Every structure is written in structure tokens, then in C-alpha cells.
Image (cartoon, coloured by chain):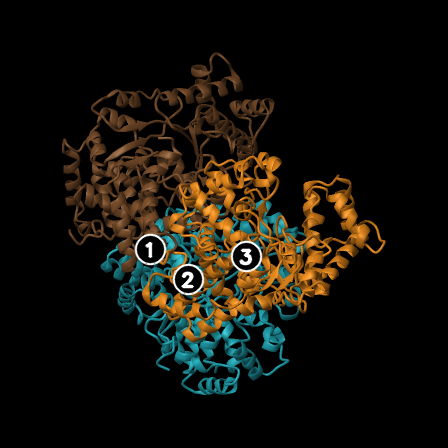
Chain colours: A cyan, B orange, C brown
Amino acid sequence: MTSSIATDPNRLLPAETGTRTIARNLLALVEDLPIISPHGHVDAAMLADNTPFPDPATLLISPDHYVTRLLHANGVPLEQLRVGGTTEVSPREVWRHFCRAWKDFDGTASGYWLRSEFVNVFGLDDAKISEETADSTYDAIASRLADPDFRPRQVFSDFNIEVLATTDDPLDDLSAHALLAADDTFTGRVLPTFRPDAYIKFDAAGFAERVQKLIDSAGDGKSGYAGYIRAMENRRRYFVEHGAVSADHGSKTAQTLKLDEAAARELFDKGMSGSATVEEADAFEAHMMYEMARMSVVDGLVMTMHPGVFRNHHPGTFERFGGDSGHDIPFATTYTEALRPLLADFGTAEGFHFVPFTIDETVFSREIAPLAGFYPSVYIGAPWWFLDAPDAMLRFRSAVTETAGFSRSSGFIDDTRAFCSIPARHDASRRIEASFLARLVAERRITEDRAAEIIVDIVDAAPRRAFKL
Amino acid sequence: MTSSIATDPNRLLPAETGTRTIARNLLALVEDLPIISPHGHVDAAMLADNTPFPDPATLLISPDHYVTRLLHANGVPLEQLRVGGTTEVSPREVWRHFCRAWKDFDGTASGYWLRSEFVNVFGLDDAKISEETADSTYDAIASRLADPDFRPRQVFSDFNIEVLATTDDPLDDLSAHALLAADDTFTGRVLPTFRPDAYIKFDAAGFAERVQKLIDSAGDGKSGYAGYIRAMENRRRYFVEHGAVSADHGSKTAQTLKLDEAAARELFDKGMSGSATVEEADAFEAHMMYEMARMSVVDGLVMTMHPGVFRNHHPGTFERFGGDSGHDIPFATTYTEALRPLLADFGTAEGFHFVPFTIDETVFSREIAPLAGFYPSVYIGAPWWFLDAPDAMLRFRSAVTETAGFSRSSGFIDDTRAFCSIPARHDASRRIEASFLARLVAERRITEDRAAEIIVDIVDAAPRRAFKL
Amino acid sequence: MTSSIATDPNRLLPAETGTRTIARNLLALVEDLPIISPHGHVDAAMLADNTPFPDPATLLISPDHYVTRLLHANGVPLEQLRVGGTTEVSPREVWRHFCRAWKDFDGTASGYWLRSEFVNVFGLDDAKISEETADSTYDAIASRLADPDFRPRQVFSDFNIEVLATTDDPLDDLSAHALLAADDTFTGRVLPTFRPDAYIKFDAAGFAERVQKLIDSAGDGKSGYAGYIRAMENRRRYFVEHGAVSADHGSKTAQTLKLDEAAARELFDKGMSGSATVEEADAFEAHMMYEMARMSVVDGLVMTMHPGVFRNHHPGTFERFGGDSGHDIPFATTYTEALRPLLADFGTAEGFHFVPFTIDETVFSREIAPLAGFYPSVYIGAPWWFLDAPDAMLRFRSAVTETAGFSRSSGFIDDTRAFCSIPARHDASRRIEASFLARLVAERRITEDRAAEIIVDIVDAAPRRAFKL
């Protein structure tokens, strides 16, 4: 096992000897720093209840659409992977499918962190993951998962996580977060994140009922659009009181729009009655992005935005397996004109933080870096969808740094629901940051002393700064 | 000549010594494998008839618009290059023009394979290609071309070509292919490819007459749109019977559209009568892409698509020299929304293979890799227009691999009409694949053992898999 | 100071030893060549009058929006930087703000040349630039600026500038240029550039008055659109007579359009009366780009185009501080279809030179290189906005070279108003060209002999060729 690339001290570092040495030295400064994860999808209740982890397939494969999609592409039907709650096969059979296709993950981002997780968290020998050994690796992981020491809270501590943000429904009572905050035996910070997408997109399933419930429960007795806005404000405040530092928005595009109240109300009413066109739904979402920024200026929640993904591209798969089943496909997204209404009014507002993420690499150098290079509110979001992809991370740094330097970015975001993958992802990020900086040092663009300061800033101070931690 | 970069064993490989050694070892595994060329523009009749090659300029310069365009940009009028059938100057004078400008090709993709071809196929000393030696190099090539051993069939064999696909008109009788298939002395496979562009684009010269001929000859007596669709189906089947494995489409964009039969018929009738608008022509082409996919599901032809090129950008040049005269210019193309109608209905259809190519690099990571990372039907087309450009190939692999791995791509496509350049192009591709994999090994992202498996898969198995060979 | 990265002979060169050695050898061939700067924003009057330089902050910080924007992003209000003529604080206080934030420039393009300028022009020890030493570095620079030997003309000579183009209003009398041309003691060439943006964009402040003045003074007695066109022609000729070699256009997009005279006149009249829509203003600008090309064919001025920037993105900042205050943000720009009207009519016109610049990197390989790889008139503009950004320059060369080689580009453009930064920018460019070529040599793609010829051509011959110098 000493020869595994998952434990190789030079993994993900540059090949050129001199540069690699610099990278190793830089990495040493940050590899033991605590993990700060200001955006992700881990379930707070799992930590609050310290729920034992499920079987290996249910933990590692079935819910992770980045993993199941590539198996699907290579011929494994999703029902053979227990995707979307299907139960045609046993978890063990899911694992066998995965092992059979394991080699297809070589070179992928998922492959990097899966390998690291298998070796470093579950103690597997990655050279021996194969169809032949599927049952024995399944048993080995299952045995580890059954270990009473391998429970969420202990793992949280073992992973050296200091801050973990979850993603939550606006009407969530946040009791799990409250329980954790009140528990002196749990020292990490688990913070809720306000995520109102399903209350903003007219085409979200059950939109009208959900919104009515929001208004009824938090609208201070107001009705319609006025009650809706009030309820949003109230629930955001509730989140702030429960430790939230940010509100996240998976908007269709980056478009923002300032409507007067009458126009907004008219769209809202159409949305509630199910009579809005696609254009009207888009306009309302753009308006609400503006409103969310306005609220952020007041209540201080950092505003993050994740636009540009065509959700549920394949209708047949969506019908059978539901959302998050592997066919969310990015499309071209632009920010310069789209964000102008929001930034014109709030771009220089005191204390406002706005973090645009993108899955369209073309905007890194063209739009995102110049925006963050001027507006005090704009922090460059980590390269969404390429977060743990080494080459993509390097392209990201190369694209944004020459315009905006190192001080304007969000820090690493793992954005994961795969709890046990968190250390692998942050490790990959730190190695790539070290690699990028080492190249700049080796090419005599920055000094080694400054690189040392910068890597600590990127890993530790940047997320605290951007997310007000 | 031993110092020529065209014969240097390290050509196109990384400079860093450790990485280069790994690349050399990987290359050794594939450099002698047979050539599989599933898409290109060589003329089957040339092989069937074993026609002697023409003079050097007519073989190497005049018909290759990637070569003539750069000469034109640097001031050589196209009539001085015998482009488009012009005959103002002698072939020897064309060659002199080329030699005068030879240095301008340094660093270009065309320059790489031309140099390789000159040295490795024609035995020139590339250090001595210049205006001064133009006549002697012309004579040297001409002498080689006059050699009775240097005929298409012998060259085909010397090049170690196993499969060569041509590109053919739907009404071609494929007699050349039949002759080759029936000839026991010819052991290669020369496969036709169904290319119906000129029968789909309303603005193709002679569209209505051509389509009427198609209907009359293969429409089973039906007329109009019904006859048209039937004739397409019949001619595709004819191609399948003559060994075709794919149908290729040079569509304007990647747009697909499902029209009902009445709407399609209405557009078709307008196209036939010459009264369709540009929008209607585009809609019909988009609909026919959908239809072609439907037919592929039935008859098994792999569907390839080459969208996104503004053909014949300069009207004056087009009028005088016709198409393929060097001014086809790419434009921004998107796939995620455009392909949805097609993929919604056929993306998971049993046995359907769809290979989108692109000349818009921005979609590699944003759209193509995610689509191929989910849909079993989608194979990532090799980087069209950058097929033999080393840096562009490396950008391609870097962009798609972290999402889709190595298992979802088409393998190398040479797409060439320059028969004698085929080995140089495949050699360049193999060297770049070795370079990319060697870097991943050197950076400890994949193991050297897996890299060895992967490069053999990429070079040999991938094209067989994607193109059902 | 010997350890400063600003004086390190290996600065900006590749880390790999073999490649670095090649780069050093290539660099040696060009590092002492004179500076040719065919496009920039230095004030000719400063040279004509040999005006002493102002204080350090007024020279180096306040007017440079690439510098002030990053300070602003990190929390320094623009009025603390004396931007836009504000005078709330002293120049010394501006310098203190800058020193406090100096570390934020590490890794940025501005940081590279500022460091070089501080060390190599002003003799600072860059390791000691900090908040603590702000007053002493301010005094050191001020002392250097007060040196009677440090005047614009002497600096011009010390910098080894051979050609410097300025950017000028069409009604400028060019007396400063005339004075310099007539002065035998001044041996450099300072050339005016015709820049008519403010006379073409209907929304430019004071458009109608300015245009009327143009017509009155140069319209040969004609009025309206006819007088306008005549005046443009006349003023261009005046510029030619005063040494101008190019006309520059900061158009909104790359769109061009050929209108008949009646249609153009109608738009012009609406623009003059303030009644034009945004679409009409855009159409008129597109038409005028076509007209400018037509005039270039006649009078020989090289046409350069800088489209694709959303000017003055933040309204509040624009109102208070005016234009060029750091919030010009690029957006997606396309060229293939947009330039077609212009290139269809003038793309192969004898002697016409057209240099498109872009801030949208996606068009380097997709559109710009293919256009320049065919049209004799099209020269690939240096990577605008990334002109002195090492990684971006390398991406640029990688993107365009494999299609268009090295013969079709404009050569380096510094585009700067920061006179004292000129040597640092050209030095960075030469180092990056050497780095790129060295990699091609090390990877055995081109020979070292050819690389030596190419780098001299790029640095010296290319700008002379593209700009007819």
C-alpha cells in the first residue's frame, strides 16, 4: 500500500523536481489546517443524531450522481444502482457494478477523491479494487462502517472539520443545528444555509402550496406578494439567529432585474395561479435575485449564486428517478450584463458579500475576475463543477489571478453531500493551490515567502473573509 | 537527416525528463498498432482503381485548403495555387510558392504533418525545403510518385491502415467500395459513410433537382416528403449493406427539432419550391437531424455531427474558386439545449451511438463531457479542426477527462482528404495521448500500469467501440 | 537587491532547466531591440513640452484604473486614491493606501510591471515596499522624478523607444506631434492615431455638438451626413499627413453593417437629434465600422478594433468619478458573422490591414486565428486586457499558433497610459514569447534555429509589418 498514488506524498504535485519541492514546502504549511466548508449538502440531522452510516453502496454510490452518471454512460441502468430510491437490486450488487467499472473513473475528479477516500478513510488497497474483489471490499467497508467509533460526530472530529455549512429549506426549523450548537460535547460549527429556490421558481413541483405555507407561517399575517416578501425576510432572520452566514441560489441564469412592486406582484400572482409563461417565470426569478441581494444588505447573509445548469436534461430518466440523477448539464452563462441591476444598486453596499459561481469556464477571465477586481462585494466563487478536478482548478487560478490576484476569491468550496469525501476534496484543493503557487515561484513571478503567506490565506483566511466566519 | 525534428524520437513529447521517459514507454505500446480511420475524405475510387498519384502540387497543395489558406493570407493569390480547378500556373510554380512560404507553417498543425510527410513518406531533408531548392524537392517528390511501388494500394498497406472510412453521396452506387470488398488481394477495409447534407440544406446548390432524383430513384414510388424520408431510409440501408458504419452530418448548428409530419412536409415543400426562409431552412435541418437519429436507432449507423462552421465566408473567393477554398470560419456553437429533442427521445436508445464534434473549444468541458458522462449513446468526438494540433489536443484531453474519463471518446479521427498525411496525423495523435497520460502518471494521478492500458484502449479499442468496427 | 524577482534573469521563464536555457538564448536575441509601440495612450504634449513628471501617486496610481480598481475591490474608496480628479487626500496618502495593499497585486499583471518599474526605473528594493516604508519609498520616487535627467524626452531615449503611437481626437491639431517631428534633437517617432469613437457613438456625452464642430471645421461646406463623412475623410487625411499609421475603434461589439446612404443618413439624423434608439445607435456604429474600413482602403490607415467591453458598469461610480474608473467589464463577443460585411467587401483589398483585438479569449482559436489564417488583411491583435499577463499571453500563443502560425499577428501592443511602465511591459512580452518558443523547441516541434528567427520577427518585424512602420 505504500505505493498507492492515494498516499503518495507527491500526488497531484508538479513533475518538475524544483517546482515539486517548492510545492511540497508550501503544502506543509496548510495540510494540517482545519477544514472550513462554507457550502455543502451534508445533512445536519445525521450529525445531531449521530446516525450510524448505512451500507457502503447507500453511503458512497447510489446518492452520488457524479458517480452514477458515468456508470450509466457506460451501460449500467440506474435501477441497477438504486438511484432515486429504487430497490431492484441489493446494495452489494450496486457495489459490484461499481467495482466492475472502477477503471473508468481513472483521470476523473470523482476517481481522485473516491480513491483517496477508499484508501485513507476505509483502509482499502486501491490496487485491488476490481470486479473480482468486490465482495471483499464491500465487506471491508461495511465492517468499518459498523465500527462504533465510525459515527458521524467522531468522523467529523477525525476529519478536523471546524466549520460545515448545510443547505436548508427556508421552513426548516433548524432544530438539528440548534441541538448541535447547544451541545458542549460537539465542538464543530454546523451552520444552516438559506436556500429558497423552490419558493422562487414557478416551475418547482408544488410551488404554490409551498409558497402559501411560507406566507401562512411567516408572513406576519400579510397575504400575497407582500406576505411572501415579508416571510422571506423573516425566515432569513430566523436562519441568521440560528447561525447561518449565507443564502444560496441555484438560479437558472445569472440574470437580475429590478421590478417595481406592482409588476412583481403581478408576476407573483401569475406564478401562484399557474398561468405564468416561461419568460414571466424567468423575470420573476431575476427580480427575486435582486430582492435577495437587497435583503442581504440588510441582514448580512452572504449571497451565493449557482446559475447555468440545465436541470434534468433527460425527461425519461427524470420521470423514473427524479432529480439529481446525473443529467444536469451546464450551458453558456454570462454575468456582465446579467448582474448589472444587482451590482448597480448593491455592488458597493457596506458589508454586502456576493459570490458568483460558474460552470462556464469562459467567464473566469472575461467576466468574473474583472467584476471581483472592482466591486468590493464580489468574491470569485471556486470553480463549481470543477471543484476537485486538478486541471480545471489550475485553469481557474490561471484565468482569474492575473486580473484579480489571490485576495478576491471565496476559498475552496466542497459542495458535497458525500460526507466521507470531504478530507479528500480539501486535500486535493490544497495540493493544487500549492502546485499553482509553486509554478509562479519557480518562474520567478512571486517570491517563495509571499507564496507561503498566500497559501495560508487561501486555505484558511479566504473562506472566513468571504463567508464572514 | 538524423537531426530532423520529424524523425526525432522525442518529437511532440514533454520536455521534462521524467515525464518524457514515461511518455516514451507509453508510446512504444501503440506506435506500431494499425491505423483505424473511421472518418475522412479519401476517394475510394483511387484505391479501387489504384490510380497513380498526380504531381506533387496537385497531390499535396492545391486541394488542401488548410495549406492554401495560409499561403493566401500571406499574399499568394489562390489562382497561383491552382485552387478550385484554376490552371493559370503550372504545378511546379505552385510548389515554388509553397516553398517560399514554408517557414510560415512553423508551429501550425499543417506544418507538423507536412514536415513529417515530406521526411518520412517522401524522404526529403526538411532542413533544405526553401525557395532555392523548390525545383529539386519538386523533382524528388515527383520521382517518388512515379515509382510503380508508390501506388495507392501499396501505400495503404505500407501505412498499416486497417480501416479507412470515406465520405459519400447518398446516391453513390458504392461500386468502388464493392470492388475493394470483393478483392481478395486487398486486405484493408474501406467503408463508405452516408453524408446527406446536400439533400437536407435548402440552400445547397441544386437542392430541389438532387432531392427529386433521390426520391425518384429510392422513394419506392412515393412522392414528396414521404418519398424523401423513405428514400433516405432506403439509401442508408444500401450503405449499411455496403459496409457503412456511420452517417455524417455537417449541420449548420447542433440544433435538433421534432416536428410532426404535417409541419415537416410543409417545410419540405417550401424548400423544394425555393420559397423557404432561412429560419424555415434551419428548422427543417434541425428536424432532419432528429429524423437521422431516429433512423440510426433502427439501422444502427453511428450518427456523427460536425456543426458550427460558417461556410464560404468570403463571397468573392467562393464565386471564383468554389467551396473548400479556405474560408470556412467557426462560430460559437452550443449543444446542451440544442441536442435535447434528439437526446430526450434517443439518448438512451439501445445501440444508438451519437458522436458530436465541435470546433468550439468552450463546450469541451461545459457541455460535451457532461453529456457523454451521462448518455450511453454519446461519444465525445475528437477535437475537430484541432485534430492534429498538439496543444489543442492537450487542451481537449484536459477539458473532458476530469468529467468523463477516457472511456467515452471517439478515438482519433483524421478527417483528411490528404491520403499521404494519414500516418503523420495518427503518429501525432499517439504522441499527444502519450504526453497527456505521462503527465498524469508523473503527477501521480493515475498509475503507470493503468496509463498503459488506457493508451492502448484510446488508440485501438475506442474507435472500434464508438464506430462499431 | 540582487535577489529581487524583478531583476532575476530567469523571471517569467519556464522552470524546467532545459527549456529555460533555450528561452534564455532566445531572449538574448531580442532583449536589447528598440521598443516599437504602435498603440497606446501616452500624451504627445508631455513629450513635446518635456513636462516634468508629477508626484509619485499622480504619476503611478491615481490615473491607472487597473491599479485603483483592485485597491477599490479591497476596500479603498476611490476618493482616497484621487481618482477622477478628486482631491480629498494628498498624493502621499494615496501612496500609503497603495503600499498597504501592495501584496494584493502579487500574481497580477499589474503587479508584475509595477514591481519591475519600481525596481528597474525607480531603484526601489521591492522587498521593502510596505505600509511601514510608504513614506520613504514615496520620497525616493519623488526624488528620482525631480531629477532634471528624468524628464520625458530623456526617459523616452533611455527606454530605447523607436516608435510610440498616441491616441488622438479627430479634431486634435496634432501640433505636439508636428513639433516633435520637426525637432532634430528628438530622434524617436511619435505618431498620432485617429480615434473617432466619440463622433460615432450616439450616446457619447455631447455627441451632437462635437459632430457639428467636426462638420463645420472639416466638412468642406457640406452639411449633415454628407458633411460628416467628408469631414471624417478629411481629418483622416490630416492624420496621415502628420504621420498617423492607424485608426482605432473602441466599438461596442464587432458588428459591421453596410447601409445605403439614405438609410445611414436617416440614422445619423436621429442620432444628431437625440431620438435614436439603442438599436439604431448600434446599427449606425456598425455601419461606420464598415465606412472606416472603406476609408482605410483609400487612405491606407491600418484599422484596429477593440470591441466587447461594457463601459462604466457601476453607475454610481461613473457619476462621481467619470469614465476609466475601473469598472469596464468585458462580455462575450463574436467576430465571424459580425465582421462578414466588412471582410466580404474589403477582406482581400490591396493594402488593407485590419487588426481585431479581443478581451474574449474564446475567440482566439475559434474565430480570430481562422480569419487571419485566410484573409490577407487580418492581423491577429495581441491579447488585449491580457497584454502583459504571462499566463494569458501563453494561452493566446497556444490558441492561435496552431492555426495561423507566427506570421499573422500584430506584435506586442502595450496599450498603456503609464509611460514609465513601457519597458517592463515589453520585457514581459519578450520573455513570454521566448518561453513559448522554447517549449516548442524542447518538445521538438520547431527547430532552435527557426525559433531564433521567429522571435526576432515577432518582436521587431511583426509590428512594422502589421502597422506599416
Q: Earlier in the sequence, mark 1 or mark 2?
A: 2
**Residue B140 visible in the snapshot:** yes
Measuring from the top left, give residue C35's x and y in whole percent: 28, 37
User: Is B271 drawn above or below residue A171 in the view shown?
Assistant: above
User: Could you tell whether A357 is left or right of C134 in the image?
Assistant: right
Q: Are marks 1 and 2 in contact (CB under 8 Å)?
A: no
Q: Amino acid at mark 1?
A: Phe
Left-right relation of C33 to C209: left
A425 relative to B377 in the view: left or right: left
Between A364 and B88, which is closer to the camera in this rendering? B88
Badge number at residue C126: none
Residue at image point 52% right, 36% down: B80
Q: Quadrant of the C terminus of chain C?
A: top left
Look at mark 2 in the image and give the residue it sits on. A391
Q: Which residue is tagged 3? A: B150
Residue A380 position by quadrant: bottom left
Cα–Cα span, label 1 and label 2: 18 Å
* Residue C278 picture quarter: top right
Kind of residue at badge 3: Phe
Look at the numbered discs 2 and 3 and tell me whether their residues touch, using CB distance below 8 Å: no
- Image location of residue A387, percent across then percent down: 44, 63
- Image coords of residue B409 (percent x, y): 54, 64
Q: How many C-alpha atoms fall within 10 Å of the one at disc 3: few (<14), some, or many (≥20)? A: some
From the top left corner, tell me how far across and down residue C445 is, in percent: 39, 54
Q: Nearer the viewer, mark 1 or mark 2?
A: 2
> What amino acid type should be assigned to the residue bearing mark 2?
Asp
Do discs 2 and 3 belong to a common subunit?
no
Question: Chain for mark 3?
Answer: B
The label number, if any, that marks residue A406 in the structure image: 1
Secondary structure at badge 3 equals loop
- Residue furthest top as drawn: C221
Position of residue B350 relative to residue C254, above or below, is: below
